[in-house]
Amino acid sequence: MDEFNSRVGAQRAILRSVNARAWIEPLFGLSRKSIERWIAVNSLSKQSVIVEHVNAAANELFFLANHSEDQVSDAYQTSAEKIADITRQIDANACG
Amino acid sequence: MHIYAFGSLCRGEVERDSDADLLALVDEFDDRFDPSSFSIYSYERIRELWQEGNPFAWHLALEAKVVFASDGVDFLSELRTPSPYRKAERDCLKFCTLFRTSRASLASEKPSIVFELSTIFLSIRNFATCYSLGVLRVPSFSRNSALRLGDDSVPLPSRIFKILERSRLLSTRGIGQNLTDSEISEVQDYFGEIENWMDRLSRRVPQNG
């Protein structure tokens, strides 16, 4: 799979882990504004572990979540390992 | 440092949910620019995109307007016309794959529905942009590019297109009403149409063209 679609897959994996829990409203994406909406609707603390993990993932994938005009390009590199690590931490947190 | 505006504002396509697309060109990391507000590129990377004939280079070349230039020079204009776009086949295939993957994900257990529909909207939009640039040679970079291909426009009712667009806005900007179960079901009824449209147009994309 090419780099672009791999990065969409990384975002999908994060959202799948987060949305495995029952929320009032699920997380729709990893843009700052959609994360803020998710925090507000679900009355989450910004200091909670899950929010910290989501923000860490968003920082890795920020370009994908926020911009659409330049998404045809493969301009950014993402650490697949880092994303996989964050996904594991969210999963572990969900079970713990 | 150079700052440009591009996107819907430069096309005069102003809607209530329009945002301002801004590009910052910098020599090195500059924490004054918030990545959620700016597309941030180095001069070197922009030159590479021009060399590649990348669709984003074409987008900027045709639409970007300089907002600020620290040296008083319009850097992008100085780059002149980007190289011809020769990756339409590869890019159209890439966005077909993106569509199919999201469609499959929606059929799996506990999908992130809004995210997947948002990704489907992105795949349709980017597929149409690459097709318009690589085949029609009349590029459309609009959010509605798939509706601006004349006879080749995506055959979706306006209502369905708007549900997909709403998903995109929910996923990227966190605005809008969540989708209802009936809207989700309605959109899914059109996945076959979208796939047929992509297949039909893909056959017209020249190899390496």
Image (cartoon, rainbow, N blue to C red):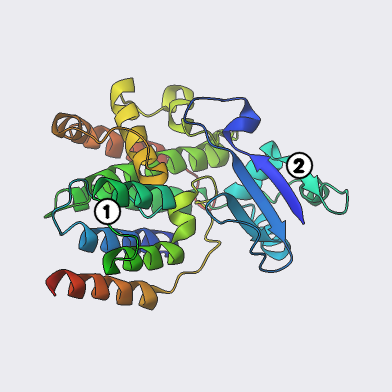
Q: Nearer the viewer, residue A35 or B52?
A: A35
**Compared with residue A93, is residue B169 higher up or lower down, i.e. above or below?**
above
Q: Position of residue A40 (x, y in %)?
A: 30, 48
Subunit of mark 1? B
**Quadrant including the N terminus of chain B:** bottom right
Left or right: B155 with respect to B39? Answer: left
Q: Dot 1, how many residues are within 10 Å of its Cα: few (below 14), some (14-19), or many (20+)?
A: some
- Residue B202 in which image quadrant: top left
Q: Residue furthest right?
A: B72
Instruction: Give me the residue at 38% from left, 66% from top.
Output: A57
Left or right: B186 with respect to B19? Answer: left
Left or right: B137 with respect to B42? Answer: left
The residue mark sitting in front, 1 or 2, is: 2
Could you tell me if residue B60 is visible in this image?
yes
Q: Dot 2, how many residues are within 10 Å of its Cα: few (below 14), some (14-19), or many (20+)?
A: some
Instruction: Give me the residue at 30% from left, 59% from top.
Output: A45
Q: Position of residue B151 (x, y in %)?
A: 43, 22
Q: Position of residue B207 (x, y in %)?
A: 49, 51
- SS at circle 2: strand
Q: Position of residue B168 (x, y in %)?
A: 37, 40
Question: Which numbered circle lies on residue B66?
Answer: 2
Instruction: Give me the residue at 80% from left, 51% from top.
Output: B75
Q: Which numbered disc, 1 or 2, marks the residue that appears first in the sequence?
A: 2
Label 1: which residue?
Answer: B101
Residue at mark 1 to residue at mark 2: CA–CA distance: 38 Å
Q: Nearer the viewer, residue A29 or A49?
A: A49
As shown in the figure, which amino acid type bears the numbered disc 1?
Thr
Q: Nearer the viewer, residue B74 or B135?
A: B74
Subunit of mark 2? B
**Compared with residue B39, is residue B64 higher up or lower down, i.e. above or below?**
above
As shown in the figure, which amino acid type bears the numbered disc 2?
Val
Could you tell me if residue B203 is visible in this image?
no
